[in-house]
Image: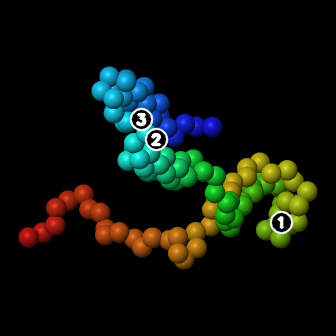
Amino acid sequence: MIPKLGDLVHSVAQPIAKGIDSALGTNMEGCSGCAKRRQILNDFSDKLYDKFWKKTESKTMEYLVTKQYAVEASSPEEAIMASKDAPAISVSANPRLGPSQMQPPGPPKTSFPPRS
């Protein structure tokens, strides 16, 4: 288990508080404000862990899979028929972007300054 930030601060501050309590007769070790701050830091640690390291449900995507074949044929139709038995020489898989994932094109980029 990964130690939380509030627990780490507590492990350092607790011996200091005990020393102050024994020297001055105070009760810093049982301070309710410290317990609240410890809980706040622990909650922050949980949120930080969930944001960066917690495994989320996997989302499926649509992929375009392309296979290339090397065949000898005298027509495109014959090449397609021959590709059924031919070994693939190249395979690629690319995510297919849907309408919500596409970004509009930006402004055109030029290598010269615009006219005044």
Foreground: 80 or 30?
30
Q: Which residue is pictured at 29% across the width and 63% down the height?
A: 109
Q: Quadrant of residue 62?
A: bottom right
Residue 95, percent from left and from top: 63, 62
Left or right: residue 4 compared with residue 87: left
Q: CA distance from mark 3 to mark 2?
A: 15 Å
Foreground: 99 or 4?
4
Q: Which residue is pictured at 80% across the width and 51% down the height?
A: 88
Foreground: 73 or 113?
113
- Amino acid type at mark 3: Glu
Quickly name the residue at label 2.
Answer: 6
Quickly name the residue at label 1.
Answer: 80
Q: Quadrant of residue 60?
A: bottom right
Q: CA distance from mark 1 to mark 2?
A: 65 Å
Q: Secondary structure at mark 1?
A: helix
Residue 3, percent from left and from top: 55, 36
Mark positioned earlier in the residue sequence (3 or 2):
2
Q: Secondary structure at mark 2?
A: helix
Quickly name the residue at label 3.
Answer: 29
Residue 1, percent from left and from top: 63, 37
Mark 3 near mark 2, Cβ–Cβ under 8 Å?
no
Please name the colour scheme applied to the rendered image: rainbow
- Amino acid type at mark 1: Ile
Left or right: residue 38 compared with residue 65: left
Q: Looking at the image, is 18 positioned above or below residue 100?
A: above
